[in-house]
Amino acid sequence: MFLGTHQPRLDDKGRLFLPAKYREELAEGLVITKGQERCLYVFPVEEFQRITEALSTAPVTAKAVRDYSRVFFASASDEKPDKQGRITIPQTLRQYAGLERDCVVIGANTRLEIWDAQAWDTYLSAQEQAFADLSEEVLPGTL
């Protein structure tokens, strides 16, 4: 499970230090792909395989499945962290997410998300009231 908020910087070569607490779990490899709201999703290989299997059982005759799968898989890049715990984010993914220097890496349960720092602040500010309002609808009876 991935939790927390971290604020690494992207270096001039497009590399980002993974949060230290997740380096061991991601040491064997990971997959980076486009996420919703112009962030990047980072999946451990096993989780990406689980999603791949789930999408392979979805009906290819459904346009939404085809559209989602095309973008999701076409933008995916498998990476392996270097000895210092850095990953290289491909240029196309950096452009998609607007990543230049200051980034935010958030834990989002089964994945990490990489955001441009300003985009994350804007998103979070807009969502905090909605978060409070939705707790009963999303998690009825648990909070």
Image: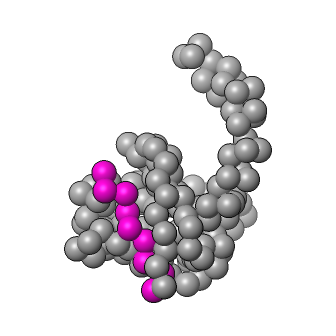
Task: Give left or right: position of 60 versus 57.
Answer: right
The reply to whether residue 98 is visible in this rendering is: yes
- Is 7 inside the magenta-drawn segment? no
126 and 78: which is toward the camera: 126
Q: Residue furthest top?
A: 141
The percent position of residue 130, horizontal first and vertical second, equals 75, 34
Q: What residue sits 75% from the left and 26% below the top?
A: 133
Q: What residue sits 73% from the left and 44% below the top?
A: 125
Q: Which residues are magenta?
A: 13-21
Q: What residue sits 56% from the left and 67% below the top?
A: 102
Q: Quadrant of residue 64?
A: bottom right
Q: Quadrant of the N terminus?
A: top left
- Is 15 inside the magenta-drawn segment? yes
The percent position of residue 38, horizontal first and vertical second, equals 67, 64
Q: What residue sits 73% from the left and 53% below the top?
A: 122
The percent position of residue 54, horizontal first and vertical second, equals 48, 53
Establish if 50 lies above or below 80: above
